Structure formats: C-alpha cells, structure tokens
C-alpha cells in the first residue's frame, strides 16, 4: 500500500496562504486538531515550526495566546504572511501590481488565460523564487509571490506546478480572492496577533521557545511510505517534493522526532504513517489519533480535471499530553 502525501508547507509543498488562509487542507481534520488544543489559559505561547498558512490558528477564533510565533523555511512565504499582517499598506502595492504587471488590453478570456499563463511561467522560470536574500516586509516581492502562489495548480509551491490562476468564466484572477479578503480584513486580527515572523530551522525555533507554557503544532513535510518496496530499496521511504536533504530529507524527519521526545512544551504532530514514526513515538507512550481525510482536499475532494473524487487517507495526530486534562503524559 502507498500512503500518498498531499498536505502543506515547506519548500516544495506550500498551500496558498494567500487565497485560502487555512493551511491544513482538510477543514474536518483542522477542526479535529483544534478541539484538542488546551484553551484553559495554561498556554501562553503558540508556535508552528512549519507554519505555511497557519490554518489551525487562523481559522479558530477561540485560539488566543499571549504570544504567537510564525516560522517557515520558505522566505517568500514568511514575507507574504508578514505583509498580509499590514493589509492597508500591502493593498496599495497589490493594486499597483495589478494595474502595471498584470494589466492587459485583451478582452477574450482565452487570450487572457494565455497572457497570464505566460507571465506565470516567466517568473517561475527566472531566479525570483530562488532569491532569498531580502528583508522581510518586502511588499513588491510579496505581490509577485502572491500572484504566483494563487496561480499555481492546487495552490502548491509554484515551481513544478501548472498554471491555474485565472477563472475564464468569471473573468477573474485568483489573486482577487486574496485582495478581497484583505479588503474585508477577514484575518487582520489574527495576522496582527503574530508577534514574530521567522525563517529559521525548526530545531532552532523549538529550542528557543520550549517551555511549560508553550504549545507547538507541527505539520511537517510528510513521508511517502511504499510497502511494496523491499526493506533495502531506497524508494521504500521518501519524502514529499525533493531529494535535497537541505529541504527536508530522512535525517530531518528523525531529527524532528528525536527532538520532540525531550520537550517541556505540549505538542501535537500531524503525519501519515511510516515505521520510524511509531519506533520513536510509540503508541504505548503517546496518544495517537486517526482521521480519514481527502488526500487532495485543496480541490474540495475532487480532481478539477477528471471530476473524480480523490482517495481518502488516514491522517495521524500524535499528542504528548492528555487533551481532557491538558497534562503532559510524562515529565
């Protein structure tokens, strides 16, 4: 059996915070997670080392903390979310971007599709995405990245994803969804509550903020586990999106799991099953929950091309505390 991974964050698999704040792609599973986060005031600091679009926090009005920490490996993603936290200023840049870079005299929807698609490919293929040497809060870069991420198929990281950023029937760019949400201040309060935007390694972030009053939700890049491969077959275990260990390879997964064992913080961890997970975080010591979710619920559970429903998968949520009492399982 193959457990096919289709969830967010990280360099090669980032959901579009921009158009769809709510990174955990299944709302059912997101609500399932949020119901287990302590809301008794014992949590003072909340952080997501793999924040992406920080959906677990953004979509729950009951989650309020003294300190909220955002972090992602993709600097463009961090920059975008930081700029969204200042909607009035960001909207000025987005309006200008729309009236200059995106402006066209074309009227036929098919011609406009070709125009926007060519523009999308141009910026995906040049060095824009690779250039991470800039200060956070760069509204110009955030405007371009917003166009790219809202235009990428299934709202994943633009490189390697097809163009899907223009609705020919409504004659509207998907970027307009983001602009509309910023205009309505839909997530402004939540965004402004984030007091730290970071672009660092997860271990550095967690080590800095680990405490009895910290809660950590982790939604890392997932393994894909193929039981049809032999034990010695390198393809038996691999990770989503890249063979580059600097992105998030097998040693990074082990490093993360080993780190979690010794934390003071309460945490919850989302994954699909693979043997190393149970080896390091065994079921007799940690609480394991399972939930059936659509593997590609970015499409609402359907493939927009074929119209067929996507397969479901069993997503796992692991806790180091009792959600009924809020107490850690061991100290």
Image (cartoon, grey):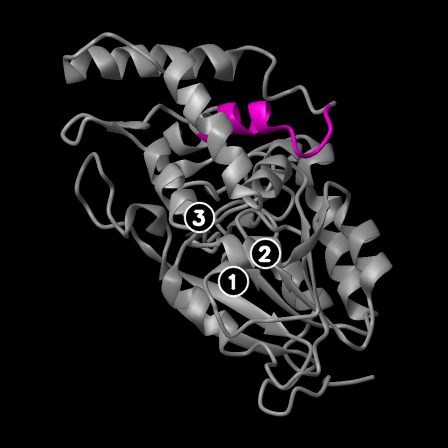
Estimate how packed mark 1 is, as few (under 14), some (14 to 19) or many (20 or more) residues with alpha carbons within 10 Å: many
Q: Judge whether residue 135 is colored magenta.
A: yes
In the picture, which quadrant includes the C terminus?
A: bottom right
For residue 56, the mark is 1
The mark that comes first in sequence, 3 or 1, is 3
- Dot 1 or dot 2: first in sequence order is 1
Q: Is residue 152 above or below residue 230?
A: above
- Residue drawn 39% across the image and 43% down it: 183
- Tell me where residue 154 appears, x and y as whole percent: 36, 38
> Residue 4 got which mark?
3
**Residue range of the region highlighted in magenta in the rendering:** 134-146
Residue in the foreground of this view, choosing between 263 and 213: 213
**C-beta proximity under 8 Å, tags 3 and 2:** no
Kindly identify which residue carries mark 2: 219
Please say if the residues under marks 1 and 2 sit with CB atoms less than 8 Å apart.
Answer: yes
Of label 3 and label 2, which has the lower sequence position? Answer: 3
């Amino acid at each position: 059996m193959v457990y096919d991974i289709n969830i967010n964050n990280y360099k090669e698999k980032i959901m579009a915070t921009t158009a769809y704040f709510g990174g955990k792609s299944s709302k059912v599973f997101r609500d399932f997670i949020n119901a287990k986060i302590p809301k008794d005031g014992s949590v003072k600091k909340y952080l997501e080392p793999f924040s992406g679009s920080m959906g677990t926090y953004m979509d729950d009005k009951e989650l309020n903390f003294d300190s909220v920490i955002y972090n992602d490996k993709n600097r463009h993603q961090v920059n975008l979310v930081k700029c969204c936290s200042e909607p009035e200023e960001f909207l000025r840049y987005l309006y200008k971007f729309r009236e200059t870079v995106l402006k066209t005299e074309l009227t036929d929807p098919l011609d406009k599709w070709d125009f926007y698609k060519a523009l999308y490919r141009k910026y995906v293929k040049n060095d824009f995405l690779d250039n991470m040497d800039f200060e956070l809060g760069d509204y110009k870069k955030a405007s371009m990245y917003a166009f790219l991420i809202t235009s990428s198929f299934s709202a994943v990281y633009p490189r390697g994803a097809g163009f899907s950023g223009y609705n020919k029937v409504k004659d509207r760019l998907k970027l307009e969804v983001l602009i509309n949400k910023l205009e309505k201040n839909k997530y402004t309060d939540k965004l402004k509550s984030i007091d730290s935007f970071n672009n660092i390694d997860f271990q550095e972030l967690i080590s800095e903020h680990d405490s009895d009053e910290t809660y950590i939700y982790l939604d890392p890049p997932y393994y894909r586990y193929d039981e049809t491969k032999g034990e010695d077959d390198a393809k038996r275990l691999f990770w989503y999106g890249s063979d580059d260990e600097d992105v998030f390879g097998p040693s990074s997964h082990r490093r993360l799991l080993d780190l979690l064992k010794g934390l003071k913080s309460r945490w919850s961890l989302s994954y699909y099953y693979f043997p190393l997970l149970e080896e390091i975080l065994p079921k007799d010591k940690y609480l394991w929950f399972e939930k059936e979710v659509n593997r590609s619920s970015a499409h609402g559970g359907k493939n927009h091309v074929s119209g067929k429903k996507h397969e479901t998968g069993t997503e796992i949520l692991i806790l180091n505390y009792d959600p009924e009492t809020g107490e850690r399982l061991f100290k």
